[in-house]
Image: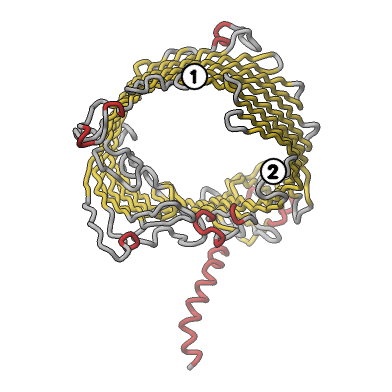
């Protein structure tokens, strides 16, 4: 009886275990089909044309496999792997006559990996590091850093694998990080001292076939400009090709960005989850992207999540929405357009944490709309074989979101309307960009609310004077020119009744901020020289504060010099001026930087930096001076490993700092000097 009960169970297991062996025992003919790494190969040849057995030679690629030839009878040749399996990948199998090296036959040979994959790549990564401060000193007896001398260790590990088998594409990645210091743990902000020292940073597992794809882990969901812009979170995603011109996607992800080993799927909590169903249809199947219609449904819920040491009390939120998007382009790609509409319903559900056993007035659900319209025209389009031809692109975009519009998966400014017009032109390496933008709030024009408007104008210009006016090759006395200008005007456009809004006429904002930049860059025989100038002005036009204006000016010089192929030097200088018209105070700053980088040989690197900063006001009441220097020495070396040497590097950093601060108005006079010495070590195992 015991045998009678075991036989039905043992028989299927025995058949399952022997099935792969029987399949491998069947000889296969080399060709387009993939064969197993230990499969017998049958060679279709004319037995009458074969030379004597001792003259036959067989090669797979450049490797001779003649000892594996056999004649089972019937004029058939076979290759049977004996000591070693066939090499994985795509090769050629060649049979020759060893007497005159006449080719008898040639066949393509495609061999699977031992795991059965047609292609498989595995890239592990493991880096260990150690960084610490050997010592430090400050002349006034104060600690130079909060920790003083310390020693920390870090770990970075990861793996990436890709495989193909029978039309299936596999993709898997994972990364983990660790640190000996608790404050550097990945989830320190969430868990504090309870955060794991070694934690999962991200992972993703994906399977694709025939245009379909399934993903699990940290993924990037499909984007919709008004409803779902931020779905790069942990969860699960499914993308299906539902027809020759249509596709469907479903994503369920965590309500916030998470890391760690907990909640590996990311969507297990229904009250803290974002779900998006997307559908797309190519209205012009013969030209993908010519005219595409997309629809999306969003269901998002967020629980109150208290981050460690957070200074606010979060609230539960929920939103549901629908979006439609139509995007297309002309056949010659000169016209492009997009139209998107969204409708979202948002509510704050009842939260017992906020109620505190009391009664709260329920929040009413709010349903609002938002829309985007954009049109681009390539008025001048350069041929693909002429990069010097003129180009001109014109664009117009309008965005609008009703008051109280909100979607938990998108960052859309509610109660605002934005209109933008731009032009981009290019010719022979030069480019010109112009943009005008207007943003207004209180779009329903509620009379008791302040309505503000922001007008922004920008212009940038790039001129390759060295290419136009200089020599065809090599350095030129002419520089490359970059210029920019920007003006932003923010002001109130209405005056709400003071008795209902609390706004007085003198409280209406009105200011204009202007910035301009100019940069010239010369290419020298052994280096480069750059000069830059920035000027800005803040013009306050608010009644009663007309003199609260500021003006800024900054100028920089930068020289880079290549001493030889191993040594480079840099020198820079800058000065700035900021004048406050209301206080009649002018702040001036000056600075100097020096640097040297070199590689004495292929293993040693040396770097040195020195920076001096000085500042003072026009009345001579306050002065500051800062001198910082650092010398860094690094050496790469190898450590013995199991099958290969392990790359490693140690880094030694010596730093010096001197500070001086004087302020006669507050009686401040501080001066100190300090130095520190740091040592770092990094080892890579893969």
Compute the Cα span from label 2 to label 1.
Answer: 36 Å
Q: Name the residue under label 2.
A: 144
The answer to whether residue 508 of the structure is visible from this angle is yes
SS category of the residue bearing label 2 = loop
Residue nearest the viewer, comparing 216 with 244: 216
Q: How crowded is mark 1: few (under 14 residues within 10 Å), some or many (20 or more)?
A: few
Circles 2 and 1 in contact, beta carbons < 8 Å: no
| Quadrant in the picture for residue 178 | bottom right
| Quadrant in the picture for residue 71 | bottom right
Question: What's the image's color scheme?
Answer: secondary structure
Residue nearest the viewer, comparing 323 with 485: 485
Instruction: Give the x, y percent position of residue 29.
Output: 55, 53
| Quadrant in the picture for residue 588 | top right
In the rendered image, the residue lying farthest to the right is: 600
Q: Which dot marks residue 145?
A: none
Q: How crowded is mark 2: few (under 14 residues within 10 Å), some or many (20 or more)?
A: some
Q: Which of marks 2 and 1 is in front?
A: 1
Instruction: Give the x, y percent position of residue 642.
Output: 75, 56
Residue nearest the viewer, comparing 628 with 65: 628
Q: Is residue 217 left or right of residue 414?
A: right
The residue that appears at 60% across and 16% down in the rendered structure is 531
Counting residues from the start of the chain, the first of labels 2 and 1 encountered is: 2
Q: In this view, does 677 lie to the left or right of 620?
A: right
Q: Which dot marks residue 584?
A: 1
Give the answer, above or below, for where 90 lies relative to 616.
below
Give the answer, above or below, for where 602 lies relative to 169.
above
SS category of the residue bearing label 1 = loop
The residue that appears at 60% across and 26% down in the rendered structure is 622
Instruction: Give the x, y percent position of residue 559.
Output: 67, 19
Instruction: Give the x, y percent position of residue 162.
Output: 54, 50
């Amino acid at each position: 009886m015991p045998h009678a009960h075991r036989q039905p169970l043992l028989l299927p297991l025995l058949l399952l275990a022997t099935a792969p062996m029987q399949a491998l025992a069947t000889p296969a003919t080399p060709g387009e089909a993939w064969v197993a790494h230990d499969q017998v190969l049958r060679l279709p040849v004319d037995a009458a044309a074969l030379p004597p057995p001792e003259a036959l030679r067989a090669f797979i690629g450049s490797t001779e496999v003649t000892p594996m030839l056999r004649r089972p009878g019937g004029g058939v040749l076979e290759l049977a792997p004996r000591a070693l399996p066939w090499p994985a990948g795509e090769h050629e199998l060649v049979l020759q006559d060893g007497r005159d090296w006449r080719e008898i036959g040639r066949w393509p040979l495609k061999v699977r990996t031992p795991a059965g994959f047609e292609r498989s790549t595995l890239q592990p990564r493991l880096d260990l590091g150690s960084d610490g401060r050997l010592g430090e000193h400050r002349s006034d007896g104060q600690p130079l850093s909060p920790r003083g001398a310390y020693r920390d260790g870090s770990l970075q590990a990861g793996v990436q694998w890709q495989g193909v088998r029978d039309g299936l594409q596999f993709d898997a990645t994972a990364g983990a990080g660790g640190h000996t210091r608790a404050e550097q743990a990945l989830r320190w902000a969430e868990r504090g001292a309870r955060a794991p020292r070694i934690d999962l940073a991200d992972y993703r597992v994906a399977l694709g076939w025939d245009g379909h794809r399934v993903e699990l882990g940290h993924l990037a969901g499909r984007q919709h400009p008004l409803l779902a812009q931020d779905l790069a979170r942990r969860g699960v995603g499914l993308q299906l090709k539902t027809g020759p011109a249509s596709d469907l996607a479903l994503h369920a992800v965590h309500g916030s960005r998470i890391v760690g080993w907990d909640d590996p799927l990311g969507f297990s909590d229904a009250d803290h989850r974002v779900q998006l169903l997307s559908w797309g249809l190519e209205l012009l199947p013969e030209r993908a992207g010519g005219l595409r219609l997309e629809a999306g449904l969003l269901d998002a819920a967020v629980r109150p999540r208290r981050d460690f040491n957070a200074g606010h009390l979060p609230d539960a939120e929920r939103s549901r929405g629908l979006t439609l998007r139509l995007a297309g382009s002309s056949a010659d790609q000169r016209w492009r357009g997009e139209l998107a509409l969204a409708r979202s319903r948002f509510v704050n559900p009842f939260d017992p944490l906020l109620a505190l056993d009391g009664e709260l007035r329920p929040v009413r659900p709010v349903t609002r709309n938002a829309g985007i319209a954009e049109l681009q025209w390539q008025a001048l389009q350069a041929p693909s074989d002429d990069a010097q031809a003129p180009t001109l692109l014109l664009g117009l975009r309008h965005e609008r979101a009703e008051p109280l519009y909100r979607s938990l998966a998108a960052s859309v400014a509610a109660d605002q309307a934005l209109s933008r017009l731009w032009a981009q032109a290019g010719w022979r390496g030069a480019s010109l960009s112009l943009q005008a933008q207007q943003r207004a709030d209180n779009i329903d024009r509620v009379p008791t609310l302040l309505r503000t408007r922001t007008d922004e104008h920008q212009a940038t210009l790039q001129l390759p004077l060295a290419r136009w006016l200089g020599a065809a090759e090599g350095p030129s006395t002419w520089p490359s020119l970059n210029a920019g200008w920007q003006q932003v005007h923010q002001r109130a456009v209405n005056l709400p009744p003071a008795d209902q809004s609390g706004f007085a006429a003198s409280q209406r904002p009105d200011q204009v901020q202007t910035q301009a930049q100019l940069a010239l860059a010369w290419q020298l025989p052994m280096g480069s020289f750059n000069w830059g100038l920035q000027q800005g002005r803040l013009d306050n036009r608010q009644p009663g504060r007309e003199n609260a204006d500021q003006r800024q000016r900054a100028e920089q010089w930068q020289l880079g010099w290549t001493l030889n192929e191993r040594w480079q030097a840099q020198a820079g200088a800058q000065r700035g001026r900021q004048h406050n018209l209301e206080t009649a105070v002018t702040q001036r700053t000056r600075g100097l930087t020096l640097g040297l980088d070199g590689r004495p040989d292929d293993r040693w690197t040396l770097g040195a930096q020195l920076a001096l900063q000085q500042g003072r006001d026009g009345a001579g009441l306050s002065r500051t001076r800062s001198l910082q220097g650092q010398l860094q020495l690094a050496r790469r070396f190898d450590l013995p490993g199991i099958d290969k040497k392990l790359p490693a590097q140690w880094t030694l950093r010596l730093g010096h700092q001197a500070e001086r601060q004087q302020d006669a108005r507050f009686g401040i006079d501080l001066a100190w000097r300090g130095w520190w010495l740091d040592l770092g070590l990094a080892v890579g195992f893969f």
